Amino acid sequence: MKLSILMPVYNEEERVADALKQALAVDYPCEIELVVVDDGSRDGTGEILARADDARVRVISHQRNAGKGAAIKTAVRNAEGEYMVILDADLEYDPQDIPKLLAPVLDGRATVVYGNRTFGSHSAYSFWYVMGNKAVTTAANVLFNSYIGDLETCFKLMPVALYRSLDIHSRGFGMEAEVTGKLLRRRIRPYEVPISYRARGREEGKKITWKDGVEALFILGRERARRPASRRS
């Protein structure tokens, strides 16, 4: 199996070099590629990415910032692996956890795997950030009669073909809710594994806001209202 690690990047000149280094240093149980999409960065991110000299890295650039969902759509379109996982370049997630997500797939227990964050004082920059995440996750569980622990997690591992079939339209952070809503509507329940997490604050460049939470609730409601879809639709 080949795993495509998809990294959307926007104005991350202080972190992107370390993000690449950490992602490539992991001892993966399969072949990997790292597909990086520079989503219209206006700082030195592009210059740093241009110096990447690992054969496993491919860099694609957007001329203008289009949002995380759009960056992932570009990465998925160019992915050559059978499976994919999203890894942000902000160093909040530890790529050393990716083999944990692969384990249930490789031993036949799961097709879709989510990394479940356990929030604590060291892993959340604010009370309202955690409550917002819990509210959106609870809404998904109520609407779809499921029991997932972390809808907004970046670590979503699944077959590339499955993600393409979901036909995600959200261009920003709403893609997280749209992906999960469409999976649950197809009665595909993610297998969850615990992961480590360290949230950065606004002063460090945290981009998600309360508006993204409101959008996520709207998207979940919209997906629930759609007619039931089969796994192949």
Image: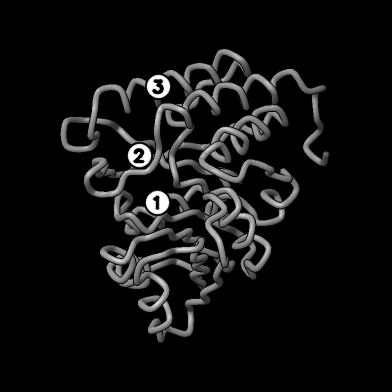
- Which residue corresponds to mark 3? 134
Q: Residue 89: x and y, percent? A: 37, 58
- Please tell me which of labels 2 and 1 falls first in the chain: 1
Query: Percent x, y for residue 198?
Result: 24, 44
Task: Name the residue at 48% across, 22% down.
Answer: 136
Location of residue 70 in the rendering, given as x and y in whole percent from the top left corner: 60, 53
Q: Which mark is residue 130?
A: none
**2 and 1 marks in contact (CB < 8 Å):** yes
Helix, strand or loop at mark 2: strand
Gap between marks 3 and 1, in whole Å?
Answer: 23 Å
Q: Quadrant of residue 232?
A: top right
Name the foreground residue: 233 vs 189: 233
From this view, report whether residue 201 is shown above or below residue 36: above
Q: Is residue 110 left or right of residue 87?
A: right
Give the labeled residue for mark 2: 194
- Residue 217 left/right relative to 131: right
Q: Secondary structure at mark 1?
A: helix
Q: Is residue 58 above or below residue 165?
A: below
Q: Secondary structure at mark 3?
A: helix
Residue 131 percent coordinates (x, y): 34, 20
**First in residue order: circle 3 vs circle 1:** 1
Q: Say what amino acid the circle numbered 1 marks.
A: Lys
- Measured in 3D between alpha carbons, the distance from the residue under mark 2 to the one under mark 1, in whole angstroms, is 8 Å
Q: Which residue is drawn at the image coordinates 63% and 18% (left, top)? A: 144
The residue that mark 1 highlights is: 100
Along the viewing direction, whichever of 61 and 92 lies nearer the viewer: 61
Tell me the quadrant of the picture where the N terminus can be found: bottom right
